[in-house]
Image (cartoon, rainbow, N blue to C red):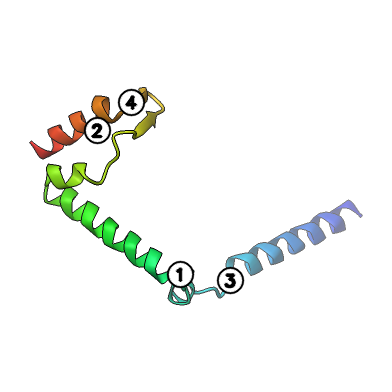
């Protein structure tokens, strides 16, 4: 009796795992169907994202500073809380130099 229960449990488990892993969901279809709630907000975020990473990649420190608030605080699990003056300017200067 226990042998039949074990075999039944094994078959049900394999069936469930197989059906869960063989999902036909196409992630690119999900991405193509995305429509932002606010097109203006979406466009603003995309523009500022482009602006920020362009400044970062071209090492334009003055442009980058205009996009980061001096109220920024960063918490690192090893070093704790650092603020704009302590961390951001020091690290950006190292990277840009």
Label 3 vs 4, first from the N-terminus: 3
Which residue in the protein does label 1 denote? Answer: 36
Q: Position of residue 65 (x, y in %)?
A: 20, 41
Q: Which quadrant: the N terminus?
A: bottom right
Which residue in the protein does label 2 denote? Answer: 88
Q: Callout 1: 10 Å neighbours few (<14), some, many (20+)?
A: few
Q: CA distance from mark 2 to mark 3?
A: 44 Å
Label 1 vs 4, first from the N-terminus: 1
Q: Is residue 46 left or right of residue 52?
A: right
Q: Nearer the viewer, mark 2 or mark 3?
A: 2
Q: In terms of secondary structure, where does tag 3 sit? A: loop
Label 2 vs 3, first from the N-terminus: 3
Q: In terms of secondary structure, where does tag 2 sit? A: helix
Which residue in the protein does label 3 denote? Answer: 23
12 or 80, nearer to the observer: 80
Which residue in the protein does label 4 denote? Answer: 82
5 or 96, nearer to the observer: 96
Q: In terms of secondary structure, where does tag 4 sit? A: strand
Residue drawn at (58%, 71%), measured in percent from left and top? 23
Among the 4 quarters of the image, the one containing residue 18: bottom right
Q: Is residue 31 left or right of residue 4?
A: left
Residue drawn at (11%, 39%), measured in percent from left and top? 96
Contact, mark 1 vs mark 4 (Cβ under 8 Å): no
Q: Nearer the viewer, mark 3 or mark 4?
A: 4
């Amino acid at each position: 009796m226990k042998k039949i229960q074990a075999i039944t449990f094994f078959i049900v488990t394999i069936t469930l795992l197989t059906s869960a892993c063989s999902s036909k969901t196409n992630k690119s279809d999900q991405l193509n169907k995305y429509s932002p709630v606010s097109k203006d907000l979406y466009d603003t975020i995309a523009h500022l994202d482009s602006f920020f990473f362009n400044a970062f990649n071209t090492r334009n420190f003055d442009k980058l500073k205009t996009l980061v608030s001096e109220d920024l605080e960063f918490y690192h699990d090893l070093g704790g809380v650092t603020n704009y003056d302590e961390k951001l300017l020091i690290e950006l200067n190292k990277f840009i130099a």
